[in-house]
Image (tube, helix red, strand yellow):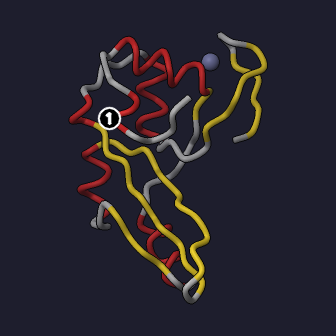
Amino acid sequence: MGLIICGKHGESGFTDRVSKEVASCIDDGTPLKESDLKVVVIRMYDEDEFLGTNKYLLTEKEFKKSGIPEVSVVDKESTYDVIKDKLPRMEGACSSCLNNFYKNNDIDPSSIDFERL
Ligand SMILES: [Zn+2]
């Protein structure tokens, strides 16, 4: 997580794996339900070594369009690139704005399981 200067929150944490569509809903205050959101999970291995998990927050619509599975396990950079290419553009969001967005939409961040802030 990096830092940004948010128009509402000043210097703030930045969550980068938020799709453009989700980010614009956060910006505009467009209401979304939990069922409108989808977290795509990519688990990365190098041989048998577990490298980590990347999670991406998409709208359900973007997820359907992307055609990628909800959870992928990759052990090669080339496989990872194929999946990343199919993901919609990521825009990222201010972490405080994302938290407010959850609150305003009655979304439980732990059930979304994207990033617990
Ligand atoms: Zn903010």
Q: Position of residue 91 (x, y in %)?
A: 57, 42
Q: Residues within 10 Å of mark 1 (few under 14, many from 20)?
A: few
Check the image and name the residue furthest to the bottom.
47
Name the residue: 55% across, 47% down: 17
Q: Is residue 48 above or below residue 88?
A: below
Residue situated in front as seen by the camera: 34 or 25: 34
Q: Position of residue 60 (x, y in %)?
A: 26, 45
Q: Is residue 49 above or below residue 69?
A: below
The local secondary structure at tag 1 comes to: helix
Q: Position of residue 69 (x, y in %)?
A: 29, 66
Name the residue: 35% across, 37% down: 112
Q: Amino acid at mark 1?
A: Ser
Q: Position of residue 14 (x, y in %)?
A: 67, 34
Residue situated in front as seen by the camera: 70 or 117: 117
Left or right: 94 in relation to 55: right
Name the residue: 38% across, 70% down: 72
Residue on which disc 1 sits: 111
Is residue 77 visible in this depiction of the protein?
no
Is residue 81 visible in this depiction of the protein?
yes
Name the residue: 35% across, 19% down: 30
Task: Say which quadrant the C terminus sits in.
Answer: top right
Q: Is residue 73 above or below residue 25?
A: below
Task: Say which quadrant the N terminus sits in.
Answer: top right
